């Protein structure tokens, strides 16, 4: 091979490499030119037949060709086949996988559990499908009470219903444990409500129950809820009690927190009152203690219950309860 022929072969090899469109074609060129039985090693082997005076120039040219074709082949195989075929623009930014975000309802439940854990409360659980005794009778709800009606409660069978509140977990907890008990019970609850911006037929509540053999007072309940209000909503949030009625507590109260938007001054969110209704609560009725086998003369306690959606909506300024169930990432990703 003359020097001119060598130059022609070099050019051809580089053109072939540039035209290779997949990994197999690139590999075939590597075998053809630099492989053990390839053209370049054959030329090196044949150096002894090259006229002596041409040998240094010929040798140099072969080595330069080898370096060049090796670099060109390496660059080809580093690019993906798709990139080699021109299907991918490797200068485009890559896909970005956003880390998941905690759902606002889970967040409220976790925060509540953490806050009450500091006060010695553990988390208790109960089933969504309950019986009449746990959901109504043991909670001192008279048999004619409207909440038992088919228009309010999802009845599944003669003695099976979707629990309308987390209060039946109070009953389960007391029947399974001796006092003192200190639990919160988060969970799903069901009512035959028509869905709109503030109602859902399947929502969440968190129940609280503290029963002890030493006297428990309404003041204990108030200070506990005041601590929760500050930890959950902010340091300048206060608590007020308004008299109310629940069959399973006596006395019963409705619990308001200072409006977190205007901080009590009065605004559209709190309808100028400075307060927002948060929970139902009260001292456990002696008749409930009797139903679970506790002696009402030697134990006392308080209970409370609030809606998880309600806390999430006011804390995060969510105007429509349905947003919490639609799994729209544009909404959910804001809670990361
Ligand atoms: N279970 C009541 C409700 O759903 C709330 C509540 C719980 C009231 C505990 C008093 C004590 O409205």
Image: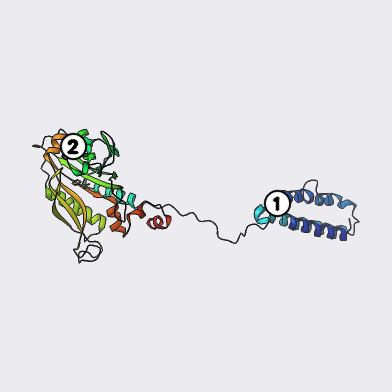
Q: Residues within 10 Å of mark 2 (few under 14, many from 20)?
A: some
Determine which residue is flagged by label 1: 22
Q: Which label's residue is closer to the chain start, 1 or 2?
A: 1
Of the 4 image quadrants, the one containing the N terminus is bottom right
Of the 4 image quadrants, the one containing the C terminus is bottom left
Left or right of 93 on screen, residue 245? left
x 11%, y 39%: residue: 286
Q: CA distance from mark 1 to mark 2?
A: 76 Å
Q: Nearer the viewer, residue 151 or 12?
A: 151
Left or right of 51 on screen, residue 296? left
Q: Which mark is residue 130?
A: none
In this rendering, is residue 87 above or below 117? below
Q: Nearer the viewer, residue 131 or 172?
A: 131
Residue 72 placed where, x, y %? 72, 57
Residue 142 placed where, x, y %? 15, 39
Numbered disc in front, either 1 or 2: 2
Residue 58 placed where, x, y %? 85, 58
Q: Secondary structure at mark 2?
A: helix
Q: Is residue 243 visible?
A: yes
x 19%, y 52%: residue: 225
Residue 189 placed where, x, y %? 28, 44
Determine contact: label 1, label 2, CB under 8 Å. Answer: no
Label 2 within 8 A of ligand 1 by Cβ: no
Q: Residues within 10 Å of mark 1 (few under 14, many from 20)?
A: some
Q: Nearer the viewer, residue 129 or 260?
A: 129
Q: Is residue 60 visible?
A: no
Q: Nearer the viewer, residue 186 or 140?
A: 140
Determine which residue is flagged by label 2: 137
In this rendering, is residue 311 above or below 269? above
Q: Secondary structure at mark 1?
A: loop
């Amino acid at each position: 091979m003359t020097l001119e022929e060598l130059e022609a072969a070099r050019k051809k090899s580089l053109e072939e490499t540039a035209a290779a469109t997949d990994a197999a074609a690139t590999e075939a060129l590597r075998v053809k030119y630099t492989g053990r039985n390839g053209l370049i090693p054959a030329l090196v082997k044949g150096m002894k037949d090259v006229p002596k005076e041409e040998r240094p120039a010929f040798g140099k040219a072969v080595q330069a060709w080898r370096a060049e074709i090796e670099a060109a082949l390496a660059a080809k195989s580093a690019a993906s086949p798709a990139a080699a075929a021109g299907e991918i623009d490797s200068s485009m930014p890559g896909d970005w996988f956003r880390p998941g975000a905690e759902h606002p309802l889970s967040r409220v439940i976790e925060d509540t559990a953490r806050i009450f854990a500091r006060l010695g409360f553990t988390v208790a659980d109960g089933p969504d499908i309950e019986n009449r005794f746990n959901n109504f009778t043991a909670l001192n709800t008279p048999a004619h009470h409207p909440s038992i009606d088919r228009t309010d409660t999802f009845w599944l069978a003669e003695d099976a219903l979707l629990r309308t509140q987390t209060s039946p977990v109070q009953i389960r907890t007391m029947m399974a444990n001796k006092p003192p008990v200190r639990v919160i019970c988060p969970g799903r609850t069901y009512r035959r409500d028509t869905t709109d911006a503030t109602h859902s037929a399947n929502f969440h509540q968190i129940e609280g129950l503290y029963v002890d053999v030493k006297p428990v007072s309404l003041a204990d309940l108030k200070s506990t809820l005041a601590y929760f209000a500050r930890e959950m909503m902010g340091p300048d949030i206060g608590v007020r009690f308004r008299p109310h009625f629940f069959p399973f507590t006596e006395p019963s109260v409705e619990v308001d927190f200072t409006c977190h938007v205007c901080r009590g001054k009065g605004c559209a969110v709190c309808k100028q009152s400075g307060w927002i209704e948060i929970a139902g609560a009260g001292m456990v009725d002696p008749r409930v203690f009797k139903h679970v086998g506790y002696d009402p003369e030697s134990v006392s306690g308080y209970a409370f219950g609030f809606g998880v959606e309600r806390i999430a909506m006011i804390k995060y300024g969510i105007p429509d309860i349905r947003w919490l169930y639609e799994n729209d990432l544009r909404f959910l990703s804001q809670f990361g």
